Amino acid sequence: MLVYLVRRLFQGLIVILGVTIVTFFIPASFHANIARELYGIRAPQSVIDKFNHDNYFDRSIPVQYLHYMNNLIHGNLGVSFNKDASFQSVTSIIGDALFNTLWLVLASLVIALVIAIPLGLFQALKRNTAFDYVATGAVFVIYSTPAFVLGLVLIQVFCIKFHVFPYSPTVSSRTGPFARLIDMFQYPRSYVLPVAVLTGLSVGGFSRFMRGSVLDTLVQDYIRTARAKGASSNRVLFRHAFRNAIIPIVTILGLSLPSLFGGAVITETLFNISGMGTVTVYAVEGNDIAVVMAATLLIAVATVVGNLISDLSVAAIDPRIRLMARK
Amino acid sequence: MTPRNHGDAPDEGLGEGELGPLEVHSEGSIVNPALSGTMRPVRGEFGRLENVEGAEVWETADPQEALPDGFASEADEARPYVKPKGLTAQMFKVFIQNRVAVVFFILLVAITLFSFVGPLFYHTNQTDLAALQQVPNNLPPGAGHPLGTDFQGFDMLGRLMVGGRNSLIVGFLAAGMAMIIGVGYGVFSGYNGGRIDDFLMRILDVLLSIPGLFLVLAAISLFGRNTSMMILVIGLTGWYGVARLLRSEALTLREREYAQAVRSMGGKSRRIIWRHIIPNSISTTVTLATFAIGDSILALAALGFLGFGIQTPSTDWGTILNNGYIALQLNYWWELWPATILFLIVVMSFNYIGDALRDALEVRLRER
């Protein structure tokens, strides 16, 4: 297990290193022009040179990359390239946005699992019945409805037509990483719609996968053996089938993170929530490539860490992997 | 063990007839259909060759004429050789049985015609912002404007056509690009295997851990919002899944008997890839291409919805939805819901048709 853990951590680090290469080199070719754009054509050359020197933009690309990496290790994401932001640090612009997005995504993941696992299980047990067909159809519709269309429908129905839920989530004056998480519990009603949109993105895929996974498990030899030994159908279902069928779902959890973060961008814009999505969209509007790249990097790191956690959880709950790794 | 000195020349040792009838290809090379796998007789219920309805029956009156000396085979007896139904025909047969997929396909064709042919019959001003000063904005549906006008005074029905045309064109082109890159990368990686494969797959891991939308947004903030740039960026972020699947396809196909046969006859890698691996993964590719078009249309719509779509006076469905979202709070339903329904039908069509194609493909595999 330890070997597996170390190897998996190492792989994750390599991937993050690869991501930094992407997030460094995409804007690197534009570095030479940034100062001119920030200060305008009339700015004296000395100001331009000083800016370039301070940001290492007058060095060679490898030196710039090392400087960038050194900054990253020290938690410094660089300086915003937006004139109006008056050279704020990227870290202060992003602030708690990463956590806000994470809470939103996590809440939707939990709810998606709570819906999808029983649904998929039940569909697999009642396969090819009217219930299965209706559920499959409904899941397909939700699965292929884009986040913003789902959001628009929900807003029209629940905010405009019937005033059931408020349009924008309530935000307290709290700050800190856990602020939005606490808000979610304090004002649950106002967070229903955003979380529902993100849940809709993943619940279809999860329940489809769960149904297939249970069906695959039910034909295994150990299920037949358990039945032959006289285990009750509930015991076969929960002790044997369910526990094995749940393992692939954990892997899928990690793999669904990139699309969920993409969906979070849309959801945050729709419901006007401050998070990585809204920060990125503002940065794109202000041509602030430093913030966009930092946001991309943070989201990628969150994805890698999420995948790592899901892989390690699989290893922890699946004795086959746990034992294989020990060898 | 793999002699490479023969090039593409057929091996003299073959042609004893036990491998089934040989085909003479247009460029003169002889390929055994039983080995190449691209053509094989359809087997009936009891494993016998069956005369499939609609299948073309080959004339085998004098096969010696077509075959060079020494290639006469015992299989050329009185029974006519039944050319199997092509892959496309088989898939079509299964696909057509899926009623919902057929309905979605018809809807998709209708929307495509609406977007491309519609403007020829329904003339509206969709370009001249100055002339729009005469037209009232946010006009409800009525005479002259069947779906009303939008916040700039554009006729909504005509707007939907323009948006649909742009969305579909961008979707097709970006998906085409994603497919070319994805198939190329995947087949190259899977066919070569080993360290090359490992390295290329690690690069893919890196790209897969960056949500595509963020990369597209980064490209927009660097290069601005022109349409060809968007096609390029959406295509460049849309090929990862294709590459993954084609790689695993290539990994299994390169070990198949027919690929080994080419190798043992001294065939080059290029021949195995172009004549065997790519043709044999064509059904996967077609399925993936269907999903890719849907995904590209969706990616463009997401950009449009965030306010980074195709610029006015032109438009795309995502931009229409974005504007309609603002109008929604004012209850101008005609500016949002018709576009939403069209867009949803198109996205669901590509998803459902892709699903149906995958089923058709799986049925074909099961029949083997």
Image (cartoon, rainbow, N blue to C red):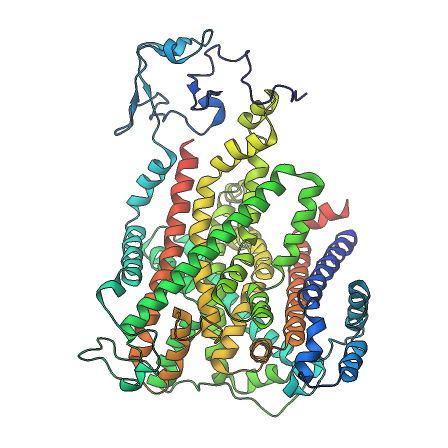
Q: In the picture shown, does residue B27 fall above or below A142? A: above
Place residue B126 in its image quadrant: bottom left
Instruction: Report whether A23 appears left or right of A260.
Output: right
Q: In the picture shown, does residue A54 fall above or below A327? A: below
- Tell me the residue at 38%/53% (across/down): A126
Instruction: Report whether B62 appears left or right of B256.
Output: left
Q: Position of residue A214 (x, y in %)?
A: 49, 51
Q: Position of residue B138 (x, y in %)?
A: 30, 84
Q: Which of A66 and A245 is in front in this view?
A: A66
Q: In the picture shown, does residue B344 fall above or below B80? A: below
Q: Residue farthest to the top? A: B70
Q: Which of A102 and B10 is in front in this view?
A: B10
Q: Can residue B136 be seen in this view?
A: no
Place residue A299 in its image quadrant: bottom right
Q: In the picture shown, does residue A70 fall above or below A15? A: below
Q: Can residue A270 be seen in this view?
A: yes
